[in-house]
Image (cartoon, rainbow, N blue to C red):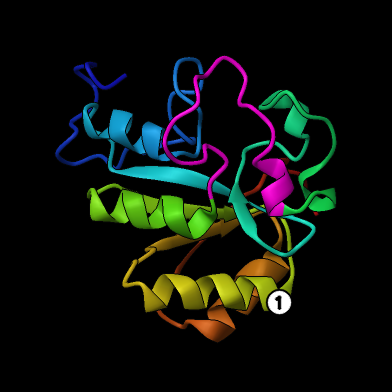
Amino acid sequence: LISSSLIDTAHTFLIADGGNGTEIPKNTKFAVDDLMTKSFSAIKIDARLTKDKKWVSLQSEDISTVTDGKGNVKDINYYDLLNHNIKNFRPQEFPVIELVESTAKYAYENSIFPVIFFHDYSKSAVKNLLGKLSNDGTRVLYFASDDIRVLEYIRKLNSDASLLYYVSEINDE
C-alpha cells in the first residue's frame, strides 16, 4: 500500500491497526519501531481494561489469541497477564503486554500519533488514563470507540480531544 502510486504519503494519514501482527506483536513498542520505518503517521492502540482496572494494549479480549494463556482480559489482573508468553515471539527486556499509556507515550515520542481505541467503559478508568497521558506530556490526538458513552465522557473531560466513532455495521436505524 505505501509503495502504491495512488497513495501520496505526504498528504495521507496512514494509520496502522496495531502494527504488523504477523511478524511483530501488535500494540507494542516493537510495532511502533517497525512503523517508523514504513511511513506510517499513526498507530491504533487497542485499550482493554484488566480486572484491576489497568488499561492494556491488546487487540483481542481473549488472551489465548495472543498468548499461551486462557481467559478474558477483564477477568485477569495486569501482573498476572505478564506471566503469559506472547505466541511466536521471543521475550525482551520489557513486557510485551504493555500498559496503554506506555505504548502511547513511546509512539508519541517517536512521531507516531497514538489513536487510543477504547473497547471497554469505566468512567474512573477512562479519567485515570486521560490523566496519566496528560501528566506525562503525551498528546493523544485521537480517541476512538464503538461505544458512544466512552466518547461522550471523553468530551466532558477534554473538550479539545478529537473523537472517532467506529461503526461496524450500517443500517437504517
Q: Nearer the viewer, residue 5 or 59?
A: 59
Residue 89 falls inside the magenta stretch: yes
Disc 1 element: helix
Residue 69 screen position, x and y as percent: 77, 29
The quarter of the rendered structure image containing the N terminus is: top left
In the image, 154: left or right of 168?
left
Q: Residue at x 73, y 58 (%)?
A: 120
In the image, 84: left or right of 108?
right
Q: Residue at x 68, y 27 (%)?
A: 67
Q: Nearer the viewer, residue 162 or 75?
A: 75
Q: Residue at x 24, y 26 (%)?
A: 38
- Residue 2, compared with residue 107, is above or below; it is above
Residue 113 screen position, x and y as percent: 33, 52
Residue carrying label 1: 123
Q: Residue at x 73, y 23 (%)?
A: 68
- Assess disc 1: are there few (<14), some (14-19) or many (≥20) residues with their C-alpha within 10 Å of its C-alpha: few
Which quarter of the picture shows residue 124? bottom right
Residue 98 screen position, x and y as percent: 53, 46
The quarter of the rendered structure image containing the C terminus is: bottom right
Residue 4 falls inside the magenta stretch: no
- Residue 46, compared with residue 93, is above or below; it is below
The boundaries of the magenta stretch are 78-98
- Magenta residues, dominant SS class: loop
In the image, 138: left or right of 173?
left
Which quarter of the picture shows residue 88? top right
Amino acid bearing label 1:
Lys
- Residue 38, compared with residue 106, is above or below; it is above
